[in-house]
Image (cartoon, grey):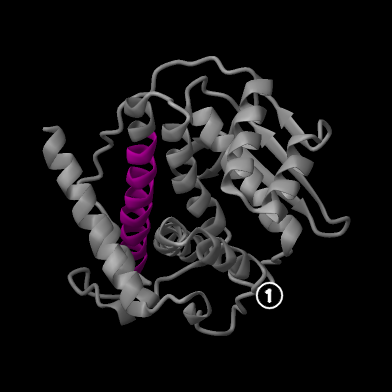
Amino acid sequence: MLDLSKNVKDSSFENEAEPLKEINLSKEELIEISRGFYKWLGDKELYEYANEMLDSKDHLQFKNTKYRINDFGEISGITYSDALFHEVYIGMNREYTLFDAQALNHEVMHSIDFKMNQKLPSNSYYGFHEVPTYTIDYLFFDYLEKMGYDLTEVNKLKFKKIEYIKGLASYSLLKLQLSSFNKFDFKDFSNERLKQGMNSFVRKNLLEVYSELLANILYKQIKDNKKYGIDNLKRFIYTNLPINEMPDFSFINMSKQDLLNVSQNIGSEFLNSKVSKK
């Protein structure tokens, strides 16, 4: 996990994401964009769960509330799963750009994930819950392009997503290094020493980076063979990953080498995109 995150990180800590154009989509329009996406995706089970959430006025709320989940600032949406009553609730904030559509669609996928298979942090890895949503993010970008949305704005969404992941990797590794500074030589950042400075906050963030790599592979599987890839996505959702075992993703045809390759590609693709912008 540390090696993968080191490949993804961006040492410059520069935020070069271009602001998106203002677009005032109504709540109803955002809901229909998401509904259209899940219909386009072509899986009956996912579509039915999406409709259930999108049609629920009590469980889907748009509010002027700022949600904060980590040191990267405010987020546009949050999904809460009530494990006792098996209910899911979404709260959405707005920034009045195309990102609102992505954010809602992302949270709807969280609700689908929770409905299909509850994953309690006490017995499964917390952090991998972003694998289905990140996979859906990539597919949603394709959908927006297909539906004729401004390609420049769609590309801004893509860049914003990758920059967030790279920033999360960089920030988390830095926190890990600083937490190890009191115990070890600051110049020695071997994985074994870094592991001793690991806490739940950093672990969760690095698992989120790991999730991006898994999602990238799932997305490519779906692009190559839609049914096969979506079946693997659903297989991932229905599988609990015990916290006392090393994750093994061979059940969705992913090897450690696949993940390493993707981490290196994301790093090089991001670097090339930054160079081309200058």
Of the 4 image quadrants, the one containing the N terminus is bottom left
**Mark 1 closeness class: few <14, some 14–19, many ≥20 residues within 10 Å:** few
Give the image location of residue 64, x and y in percent.
65, 22
Verify whether residue 15 appears in magenta. Answer: no
Residue occupying the point 25% across, 77% down: 190
Residue at (43, 25) in percent of width and height: 149
The answer to whether residue 204 is above or below residue 76 is below
Q: Nearer the viewer, residue 262 or 96?
A: 262
Tell whether 151 sits left or right of 37.
left
Viewer-nearest residue: 189 or 89:
89
Can you say whether 10 is above or below 53 in the image? Answer: below
The residue furthest right is 85
Image location of residue 4, percent across then percent down: 32, 68
Examine the residues drawn in magenta and state their main secondary structure. Answer: helix
Task: Using the image as rendered, state which of residue 120 and residue 86 is in the foreground.
Answer: 86
Left or right for 207, reference 8: right
Q: Is residue 4 visible?
A: yes
For disc 1, the marked residue is 123
Coordinates of residue 137 in the picture (x, y in percent): 48, 45
Corner quadrant of residue 38:
top right
Residue 110 image point, x, y percent? 64, 50
Q: Which residues are magenta?
A: 157-181
Q: Is residue 162 magenta?
A: yes
Residue 126 seen in render: no
Residue at the spot 34% in from the left edge and 32% down from the top edge: 156
**Quadrant of the snapshot with the C terminus:** top left
In this rendering, is residue 100 above or below 84? Answer: above
Q: Residue at x 15, y 33 (%)?
A: 277
Kind of element beneath mark 1: loop
